[in-house]
Image: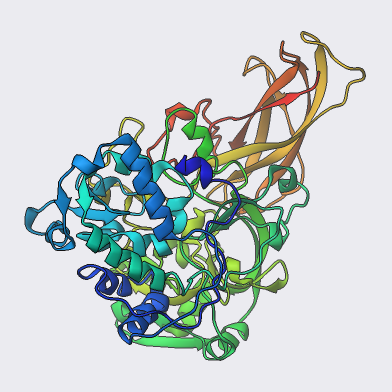
Amino acid sequence: SFGSARTGSQPFFGSYQSSTLGAASTLCPNSLNDLKHDTAAGVFLAAVAATIAAGATMTVAACEPTPSQVGKEDFEAVQSEHDIDSMPLYSLEQVAVNDGLDGKPIWMTYGGVVYDVTDFVANHPGGSEKIMTAAGSAIEPFWHLYRQHYASDLPMKLMEHMAIGRLSDDDQDKINEQMEALEEDDPYAREPARHKALKVHSDTPMNAETPTRLLNQSYLTPTSLFYIRHHHPVPYLTDKEIKDYQLKVDLSAYGKGVVSFSLDDIKKMKKVEVVATLQCSGNRRSGFNTFQRTSGTPWGQGAISTAKFGGVRLVDLLKLAGVDDPVKAQEEGGIEHVRFHALDGMMASIGIEKAANPYGDVLLVYEMNGSPLPRDHGFPLRVLVPGYAAVRNVKWVEKIELSPTEAKGAWQQGLNYKTLPPCISDAKGVDLKKMPSMTETSLFSGITKIEQISDGKPNPGDRVTIRASGWAWAGGGRNVVRVDITGDNGKTWANAKLKEGSDQKFGRAWAWVFWECDLECIVSESGAVDLASKAVDMAFNTQPEKSDHTWNVRGLGNNSWYRVQARVA
């Protein structure tokens, strides 16, 4: 019931009109303090902790259910599945002792239930480092920020098996009191307005895909319909903060200092425009879930979009900052990576060979489709790393850093963007450091429209002529050279006509290709036709037939044949 009540496009939390925060006593040992120092939580939680400590008061506006209210509902759901009342009773002090240090187990509380998450930590989709910030404490304040936990029933289904006891009523009351205060200052209160046509999977943080029917309407995706993938609230800058904004380029590992650039400084440099497709690494994750459930947003095919990005080449900026010879910096100075630090606390990196390659077209972007970069897509600056997984195209960049090692954190070194083998459903015991994170992407295609072009109303068993259209895209700048369509599960194939995007530069095909194909299909007993598409790139890679061959626990990179059924009779 938890999942069915909290999926779809309706918001889980209303817009809060708060003034000041109410006073509160101790939430639990180190819980707010740890969260305050989590860079992803940013200034918001630091201000919350300070305001709570100051004993301020506040008024509350009407809103939809809050995390603490949801927590009570979850507790009742777990009670119905387990005899919680017969489980041992614990205090916050007892929970705090079990923080994973010195070989101790890892306990957390939520909604009045105590959980032992020791064996789950390695499998946390957000990475073990992130979940460990809540070790030995309540997770309610963390989920107040990371609300993607409420967009699916999966977290509670997992946690049901980890329940070991119940929290004392007095201690849970303390948590509830502080959560009431914490919830009055909503970190998502200043989110941008979004187009109502987007298919929303969660709105705090916003994760929304472009509807299938709109993917092929124009080669450049309208900015308002460009898919959105966020991990945190969208950073909000005041006019003064925008005016004072400085991008820091840290060359300390290169033997030089930190150089700062204003937006005006960057816009005075030579402007370059690149048309590129960005795709979430979990696009088509829902296709994996039909085989075996994964963790993450159940995207359809719409977590992909294309735009014309305007900005400056990263290699030009690095040169202006003082990087004289990137090749020498790598071969003699040991510089292997360029790290990107975002205003929301996210960090990711790419190899120096991509970053410094003038033909790699890596940009520092301030324009999108000819207009200023919107907040949802990285204002004031984002990185464009064409041909790479979208997570490497870091939004809201505040610092660029040369480094001998890749970026730290869940988005680079954690489980988030590591593609495990199909045989592994438990990451415990897996040395993630030996597995590369997603960078250059594979080969993909999708079908967006099917229409009957032969005359008459067909009956089951009849042959009909169908016109199908869609998109195809390969990572790494590899040109798509062919798209094949089948209406009989691969027994016969028709070759699609490549349209927009088919004339991109050889080896620098950063954007998708549109295609169209007429083919004969046999109408099934249900009155439908079943189609599938597979693309072929310039290296003559092709898409695998089935998703179970590439299934992975995080649901990354599903590039199996795109299958769709359309009723015609």
Vertical relation: 567 (above or below) 506: above
* Position of residue 163 in the picture relative to residue 104 (left or right): right
In the image, farthest residue toward the top: 461
* Position of residue 189 in the picture relative to residue 323 (left or right): right
Residue at 62% from the left image edge and 18% from the top image edge? 489
Q: Position of residue 308 (x, y in %)?
A: 68, 63
Quarter of the image where one finds residue 401: bottom left
Residue 439 visible in the picture: no
* Position of residue 538 in the picture relative to residue 331 (left or right): right
Closer to us: 560 or 72: 72
- Quadrant occupied by the C terminus: top right
Vertical relation: 503 (above or below) 97: above
Residue at 40% from the left image edge and 79% from the top image edge? 43
Closer to us: 278 or 67: 67
In the image, farthest residue toward the left: 102
Q: Position of residue 140 (x, y in %)?
A: 34, 60
